[in-house]
Image (cartoon, grey):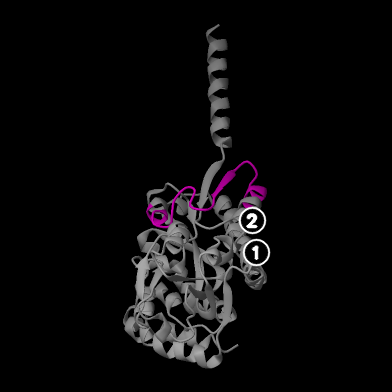
């Protein structure tokens, strides 16, 4: 009888052990944009690939549109372990490393291909691990696209921005960018931008085509200038301590899934940028305003002193490498 009871107890413990072992690792992936954007699609692709590569071992939960954490809270949540993967705009890393401010410098990159070349360079790759001492590890860069200026007045020349209030992300460089043309930058959470534009809290903002369309900013802005003055990219990051605690096979599977999902998202960003632009034009709610070479040159001249202003923090070597990336 005693033997039978011991056998049953051992069997129960063994079953519990197998059940515990079989419980998948829950990975919360939080971001602040819509599922239809390139970042949104990449997050869903990561879930698909990770769960396929590691069946029963991981469960990826994707939270778009600030459902879990807004862009003002997600970094803190990552470091606290409340979320495992986030993909903040590169503008959000200023307090963790000043070097990533390079991506906010206005008119530094001629086009998205130049951004690609810089991010693939040794200098660009080194930035992925530049925050490891702060507990943050970068997987890779994800594109949204080149940024366009929008406002309720036409911004053909930098003097047209004088006195206007512009929504910006929490970035010292972006603050300096608009101050350089006499604007009044306002740091506002992404989730609150539509209402801020609708109610006149701010007069304008800057965003890639996908954000403008998916968040309906073109419904509350009269003009969108094709300025291509900067890049809105993201770094997909994780909590370094959490990542280093994962078994090697899980790390390998997740890294492969992440690399493939980032490539998928970036391809979508390329393909969809002009598509979103065309949809905005078709909606006829905002006028898309092309800028001539001369007009762009005037904006670049007005904003370029910002490079020098932040050269000491970012590093001249990085800025030089970024400039070289404009040549194929």
| Residue 229 - label | none
In this rendering, does residue 97 appear at all?
no
Under tag 1, what secondary structure?
A: helix
Whether 121 is drawn above or below 259: the answer is below
Asked if disc 1 and disc 2 are in contact, CB closer than 8 Å, the reply is: yes
Position of residue 186 in the picture relative to residue 246 (left or right): left
Instruction: Mark 1 or mark 2: name the one nearer the start of the chain.
Output: 2
Span highlighted in magenta in the image: 50-76
| Residue 45 - label | 2
In this rendering, does residue 154 appear at all?
yes
Q: Residues within 10 Å of mark 2 (few under 14, many from 20)?
A: some
The residue that appears at 41% across and 72% down in the rendered structure is 100
The residue that appears at 54% across and 11% down in the rendered structure is 5
Under tag 2, what secondary structure?
A: helix
Which quadrant: the C terminus? Answer: bottom right
Which residue matches tag 1?
264
User: Along the line of sight, which residue is nearer the eye, 198 or 216?
Assistant: 198
Which quadrant: the N terminus? Answer: top right
Residue 309 among those drawn in magenta: no
Task: From the top left corner, tell me how far across and down residue 151 is, in percent.
Answer: 47, 73
């Amino acid at each position: 009888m005693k033997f039978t009871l011991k056998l049953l107890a051992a069997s129960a413990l063994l079953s519990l052990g197998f059940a515990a072992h079989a419980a998948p690792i829950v990975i919360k992936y939080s971001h602040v944009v819509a599922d239809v954007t390139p970042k949104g699609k990449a997050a869903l692709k990561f879930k698909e690939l990770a769960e396929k590569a590691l069946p029963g071992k991981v469960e990826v939960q994707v939270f778009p549109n600030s459902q879990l954490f807004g862009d003002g809270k997600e970094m803190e949540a990552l470091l606290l372990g409340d979320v495992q993967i986030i993909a903040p705009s590169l503008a959000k890393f200023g307090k963790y490393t000043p070097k990533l401010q390079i991506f906010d410098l206005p008119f530094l990159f001629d086009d998205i291909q130049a951004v690609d070349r810089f991010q693939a360079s040794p200098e660009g790759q080194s930035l992925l691990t530049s925050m490891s001492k702060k507990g943050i590890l970068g997987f890779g860069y994800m594109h949204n696209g080149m940024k366009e200026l929008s406002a309720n007045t036409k911004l053909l020349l930098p003097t047209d921005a004088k006195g206007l209030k512009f929504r910006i992300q929490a970035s010292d460089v972006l603050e300096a960018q608009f101050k350089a043309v006499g604007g009044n930058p306002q740091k506002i959470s992404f989730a609150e931008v539509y209402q801020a534009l609708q109610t006149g809290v701010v007069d304008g903002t800057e965003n890639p085509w996908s954000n403008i369309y998916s968040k309906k900013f073109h419904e509350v802005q009269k003009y969108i200038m094709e300025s291509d003055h900067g890049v809105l990219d993201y770094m997909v990051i994780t909590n370094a301590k959490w990542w280093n605690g994962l078994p090697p096979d899980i790390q390998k599977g997740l890294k492969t899934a992440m690399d493939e999902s980032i490539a998928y998202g970036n391809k979508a960003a390329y393909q969809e940028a002009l598509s979103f632009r065309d949809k905005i034009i078709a909606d006829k709610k905002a006028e898309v305003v092309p800028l001539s070479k001369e007009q762009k040159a005037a904006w670049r001249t007005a904003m370029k002193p910002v490079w020098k202003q932040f050269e000491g923090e970012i590093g001249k070597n990085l800025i030089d490498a970024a400039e070289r990336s404009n040549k194929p």
